[in-house]
Amino acid sequence: MGRMPLTARSTIRVVIADDHELARVGLYRILAADTEVEVVGEASDGEQALALVESLKPDVLLLDILMPRKNGLETVRALREQIPAGRPYIIMLTTFEDRYYLEQALAIGADGYLSKDVTRQELLDALRSVLKGERVFSRSVLALMHGSHDSPRDPLPPVTLTKREEEILELVAQGLTSNEIADRLFISPRTVETHRAHLMEKLGAKNAASLVRYALMHSMFFVPHRSKDPSNT
C-alpha cells in the first residue's frame, strides 16, 4: 500500500494506544476538539492496539512504548509484518527520549517519534504531516538526532536469565512491588528480593528503571506468563 495523502475523508481517524488512562483521556480531549480528527478507538496494551487497527482501519496509530502484553516496539514490528507501509501511519508518543528507542522505532517501521511534552498544535500538525508521507519528530527528538543531547548510555549487554528471573523482570517492569510479585508467583517476598538482587547484579542495573530499560531493549518485555515451576524458585 502506497503512502497517499488523505483525500477521500474529511477527518483523520486515530487510534490511541497507551496503558495510562489519564494519558488516553488527555489525548482524546485534545484530538476530539479538532474537527478534522476523529478518535475511533483506544487501547491499553499492544494486543488491543493490533486488534483495533485490524477492525477499525485507522489512518494513524498513536503508540506509547511502555505497555503490557506487547510493548510499543513489538507492536510496531507486528503491525509492519502485516502492513509494510501506509495506513496506519504509526507515531510513537512517549517519554523515552533515548536514541536507542528512536533508532529501533524508525528501523522497524514507525513514521514519527514525539515526546509527550509536545503542544496541542505540534501534535495536530504531526498528524497532518504524517499523512503526507512525512516523518515527524518533536523538537526535543530532533535535538537528540542532531546530537544536542548527551550521548545515550551503551546498551546493557544481553545476559542469560533463568525463567524465574524473566518472570520477575516482567512484573517489575509492570510496576509491581515485591509483595505483589510474591502473591502473583506464589513465592515469598524474600525470594523475590533475592531474585531482584541477582537481576540487578547480572544486568549492572542500579534501579527498577534500568531493569525496564533492559527489558525493552532486548524485547523481553511482557513475555507470555509461564506456569509455576517449583524448580525455578
Image: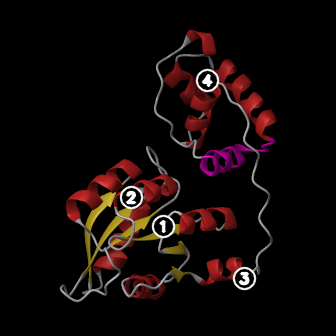
Looking at the image, is 193 positioned above or below residue 77?
A: above
Which sits in the foreground, 207 or 96?
Answer: 96
Mark linked to residue 146: 3
Mark 3 → mark 1, Cα distance in angstroms: 20 Å
Amino acid at the residue labelled 4: Arg
Q: Which residues are magenta?
A: 204-218
- Counting residues from the N terminus, which is met first, the one under dot 1 or under dot 4? 1
Asked whether, in this view, residue 19 is left or right of residue 13, the answer is right
Q: Position of residue 120 (x, y in %)?
A: 44, 83
Q: Mark 4 — residue? A: 164
Mark 2 → mark 4, Cα distance in angstroms: 30 Å
Give the residue at x 58% y 65%. Answer: 95
- Counting residues from the N terminus, which is met first, the one under dot 2 or under dot 4? 2
- Determine the secondary structure under disc 1: loop
Which sits in the foreground, 159 or 176?
Answer: 159
Amino acid at the residue labelled 2: Leu
- Determine the secondary structure under disc 2: helix
Q: Mark 2 — residue? A: 79
Asked whether, in this view, residue 16 is left or right of residue 119, the answer is left
Q: Is residue 209 magenta?
A: yes
Which sits in the foreground, 26 or 123?
Answer: 123
- Counting residues from the N terminus, which is met first, the one under dot 2 or under dot 1? 2
Q: Residues within 10 Å of mark 2 (few under 14, many from 20)?
A: many
Q: Quadrant of the C terminus?
A: top right
Q: Is residue 213 magenta?
A: yes
- Counting residues from the N terminus, which is met first, the one under dot 3 or under dot 2? 2
Looking at the image, is 182 positioned above or below residue 104?
A: above
Residue 18, image quadrant: bottom left
Give the residue at x 64% y 51%. Answer: 217
Mark 4 → mark 3, Cα distance in angstroms: 41 Å
Q: Main secondary structure of the magenta part?
A: helix
